[in-house]
Image (cartoon, grey):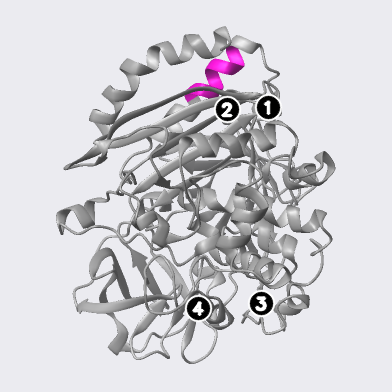
Amino acid sequence: MSSTVERLVASWDDVIPAAMRRNDVPGLAIGICDANGTLWTRGYGRTRRDGGMAVTPSTRFSVQSTSKLVTATLALRAVQLGLVELDAPARQYLPEFTVRSAFEAAPHERITLRHLLNHTAGLTHDAPIGSNFDVGSGSWADHCASINRTWLRCSVGHHFEYSNLGIDLAGLILERVWQAPFAELAALELFMPLQMTRSTFDAQVMAADPQRAVGHWTPFDRAQRELPVEVPMIPAGGLYTTVEDALRFLRLHLRRGVPVLTSAVLGSQYVVSPVDPRQRLGYALGVYVDEWAAGTRVLHHGGSGWGYQTQLCWLPDAGLGLVVLTNSFDHDLQNELARAFAEHVAQREGLPRASPPEHRSGANEAGDVSGLAGHYVGRLGDLTLRVQGERLVAVRDGQELEAAVTAPHTIQLADESGRLLVARPGRAGTATYLCDLHDGQTYYRNEAVDTPASELPPQYAGSYAASLCGVEVARFALWQDGASPVIRRGDEADLRLSPVDETHYLSSDGEILDLTQPGVTYANVALTRVGDALPTAAGSRRSSVRGAVSAPQ
């Protein structure tokens, strides 16, 4: 083991247990590897809060959305074998596939396998059947078929929008071309060659394992209920594995594809489809291409939900990787440890660091900026732009930042990364989206100027709840606010709604309120009426990582 790794892990036997107590995490498994093998692994705590077994490096955890990285790598195996093409239309393999859109006609004709894997198809996150809020109402086939009833959040290829459904459709394509159930082909084409003997997409195998880590999440703990083991979004979130096996998978990437992929095919997995030529980072094919530790290149994918938080990351310039698995949802310890790992390695190894663009302060260089002012909502937080005299000011995470329009439709923030935002028009031609050229994240404008006046049928105004397996996990409110209906989830922002037709409303962040069902659905989540009381104060949107049942990372 290198001195870099030795110095780090020597402190973790004290740091990790203390952090677990602070964050109320019952169990955690962690490991580090290089291209040649495992360097260090450790298990801490218990498989369940009320006892269970001691966590070891062989304990199985759900890795939730980290499954997407594995599914995308499996898709590249199919590419290498000539079974699929990344830029072929999805309907070439799934002729029954369709989807609805308020932005364009027949979008399903344009969606490719690449769009599905890099989340640029415009798909919403959840399906009507088999989702983060729906377990056991239908089969895997029913889940996939129900995607045909969903609406896109933007036009195809417009920008990155994280979605379980894209990865699930990619998994369905793999089933079709290999003519085998997804769990079986993953075992045959990936797990067996990599000797990942305790990895599975089969929930029944996990449920029967006495060494499995049981997931914990506050709503279910309070109800004294266990979270379900079956994850209906199988390719997008259904992988169960151990730290030992996850490190074996990580070594595939550190060894440039050996023994499953050629280096050329694997390299295509790390190519980001940018919204603008100036974008350097973002989501590629099932993996985030990122910079941590003041600009050190990191590839990663986390998973979050159903009582688990996970992180898998590697630093290609150092040839080192880390896996963190936990069996609790209400914390961010997996990311804290991953970033501490990246910072330590970057310092010890003297890794190259990116220099942020030089901030160009002073007067704006592109004329009137008033058309950009407003409140923008994003998947991982919000951004507000306001004009003060001739200055443009941005507020993000409660922090006020100087901003400047440095080129037409381009805003630069005076933060640590000097990040650039590009304003993009929506259906009405006004600035509707802000796309972050640092990492590809998108903010949606949440202003009445982009929302035509409309009336919500008064019988639908009220408070609603969303449940998982009979346990309430989220609250919503729906009401008329001046000229626009609005919907709010928990303590997040009030999202404005505009009519698509008589029974469908499009929220400012692209989700659909559907009034055609016996009840109300929003973003394909069934809502149950719980009262007529309405909120009086506007919400302050927070990260959806804490609000979602299986939040993306």
Dot 3 or dot 1, earlier in sequence: 3
Q: Disc 1 to disc 4, how far (Cα)?
A: 38 Å
Up the image or down, 150 lies above or below 87; here it is below
Give the x, y percent position of residue 491: 30, 57
Residues rendered magenta in the picture = 340-347
Q: Is residue 423 visible?
A: no
Q: Are marks 2 and 1 in contact (CB under 8 Å)?
A: yes
* Label 3 vs 4, first from the N-terminus: 3
Check disc 4 and report the residue beneath it.
498
Residue at horizontal 32%, vertical 57%? 539
SS of the residue under disc 3? loop
Q: List the residue tagged with mark 3.
A: 103
Q: Nearer the viewer, residue 149 or 7?
A: 7
Magenta stretch holds residue 553 = no
* Amino acid found under the numbered disc labelled 3: Phe
User: Do the CB atoms of the residues marked 1 and 4 lie less than 8 Å apart?
Assistant: no
Local secondary structure at mark 4: strand
